[in-house]
Amino acid sequence: MTVDRVACLSCGAAPAICPKVFELGSGDQKNRVVDEYSVELNEVVSVGIIPEELYECAKAAAEACPANAIRIEEVKE
């Protein structure tokens, strides 16, 4: 999944809906993937890979994002 941290409004919707996957960054208050699932983090983007059992939670958070800043894609192994 990818969080567009530039588009993020810092509203807190995603972390409120799915705190096991998302949190607001401590410095800039922009949404990001929690450390446990994070594979890339910078000022522009937060990328993570989550287990399948958290997919529905993450999807609900992405759908609630008013900026449409969260993209979820299936990773094929």
Image: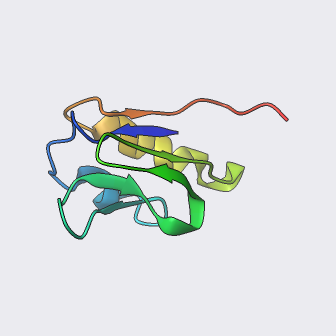
Q: How many marks?
A: 0
Where, by quadrant of the figure, is residue 69 drawn?
top left
Task: Specify whether 7 is left or right of 72.
Answer: left
- 12 vs 7, nearest the viewer: 7
The residue depicted at 70 percent of the width and 49 percent of the height is: 52
- 57 vs 46, nearest the viewer: 46
**Vertical comparison of 76 with 12: above or below:** above
The residue depicted at 19 percent of the width and 67 percent of the height is: 27
**Vertical comparison of 39 with 74: above or below:** below
Task: Specify whether 13 is left or right of 10.
Answer: right
Q: Position of residue 7 (x, y in %)?
A: 21, 33
Outermost right residue: 77
The residue depicted at 18 percent of the width and 60 percent of the height is: 29
**Vertical comparison of 35 with 2: above or below:** below
Where, by quadrant of the figure, is residue 77 drawn?
top right
Q: Position of residue 22 (x, y in %)?
A: 40, 58
